[in-house]
Amino acid sequence: MTEERVTRTETPDGNTHTETTIVRDGNGGGSKGWVLMVILLIAVLGGIYVFSQMGGAEVAKDASIADAADQVGDAAQQAGDAIENAADNLTDGE
């Protein structure tokens, strides 16, 4: 913000002297702007890192669920085979 200040001085002789002073607040925000820009950049990079880590965790979780489902399927297949063998043994024994 720029402010203009005018000072008038009158001497005892009756002469008037005017002085104009222009006052500017700050230096236009040059260094403050750069600091805020760096902080914003760090925050954005941190957010990208966090979201990428969360995505990796999601993939690992999905892979674990798929592996567990495969194991359940294998166990069911083995149980079916065992039941079939037991039934074959019972019918062969008659």
Image: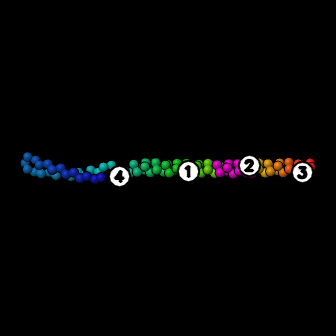
Give the foreground label among 3 and 4.
3
Graded by Cα atoms within 10 Å as few (under 14), some (14 to 19) or many (20 or more), the crowding at tag 4 reads: few
Residue 85 in view, yes or no? no
Q: Which mark is residue 28?
A: 4
Q: Earlier in the sequence, mark 1 or mark 3?
A: 1
Q: Amino acid at mark 3?
A: Thr
Q: Earlier in the sequence, mark 3 or mark 4?
A: 4
Q: Amino acid at mark 4?
A: Gly
Magenta residues (range): 61-73
Q: Which residue is mark 3?
A: 91
Q: Earlier in the sequence, mark 2 or mark 1?
A: 1
Q: Main secondary structure of the magenta part?
A: helix
Q: Which residue is mark 2?
A: 71
Number of numbered tags placed on the structure image = 4
In the picture as drawn, the residue positioned furthest to the top comes out as 12
In the rendered structure, the answer to whether residue 94 lies left or right of residue 22 reads: right
Q: Residue at x 73, y 51 (%)?
A: 70
Q: Amino acid at mark 2?
A: Gln
Compute the Cα span from label 3 to label 4. Answer: 96 Å
Q: Which mark is residue 51?
A: 1
- Give the structural element (helix, strand or loop) at label 1: helix
